[in-house]
Image: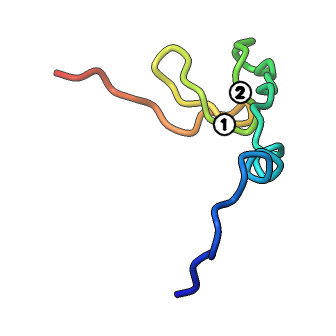
Amino acid sequence: MPNPKRRHSQQRSAKRRTHYKAEKVTLSKDSTTGEIHVRHRAHTSEGKLFYKGKVVAETSPIK
């Protein structure tokens, strides 16, 4: 495999990494439960799993 002959400078590495940054998470309010959650993710409310305002799955209590 090819290897670099010389070491990359710190500035060169930093230029490459400028695009890796944290982004703010977009939140939405569920129309059914009124709960705030991360967009495009399922969330639980009162033991039920909701996605796009609809119940996807219900969890039964553990015995």
Across and down, in percent, residue 24 comes to 80, 25
Compared across the picture, whether 49 is left or right of 37 comes to left
Residue at the left extreme?
A: 63
Residue at the front extreme?
A: 6
- SS type, badge 2: strand
Total tally of numbered discs in the picture: 2
Task: Name the one closer to the observer, 3 or 45.
Answer: 3
Q: Label 1, on which residue? A: 41
Mark on residue 30? none
Across and down, in percent, residue 41 comes to 66, 36
Compared across the picture, whether 48 is left or right of 55 comes to left
Task: Name the one closer to the observer, 57 or 25.
Answer: 25
Crowd around label 1: few <14 · some 14–19 · many ≥20 (10 Å): few
- Disc 2 to disc 1, C-alpha distance: 6 Å
- Residue at 77 percent of width and 26 percent of height: 25
Compared across the picture, whether 3 is left or right of 30 comes to left
Dividing the image into 4 quarters, which one contains the C terminus?
top left
- SS type, badge 1: loop
- Residue at 69 percent of width and 59 percent of height: 8
Amino acid on which the number 1 mark rests in the picture:
Arg
- Residue at 62 percent of width and 75 percent of height: 4
- Residue at 69 percent of width and 15 percent of height: 33
Q: Label 2, on which residue? A: 38
Above or below, 62 against 19 in this view is: above
**Toward which corner of the image does residue 29 lie, by quadrant?**
top right
Across and down, in percent, residue 3 comes to 57, 79
Q: How is the image coloured?
A: rainbow
Crowd around label 2: few <14 · some 14–19 · many ≥20 (10 Å): few
Q: Are marks 2 and 1 in contact (CB under 8 Å)?
A: yes
Amino acid on which the number 2 mark rests in the picture:
Val
Task: Name the one closer to the observer, 29 or 56.
Answer: 29
Across and down, in percent, residue 26 comes to 81, 27
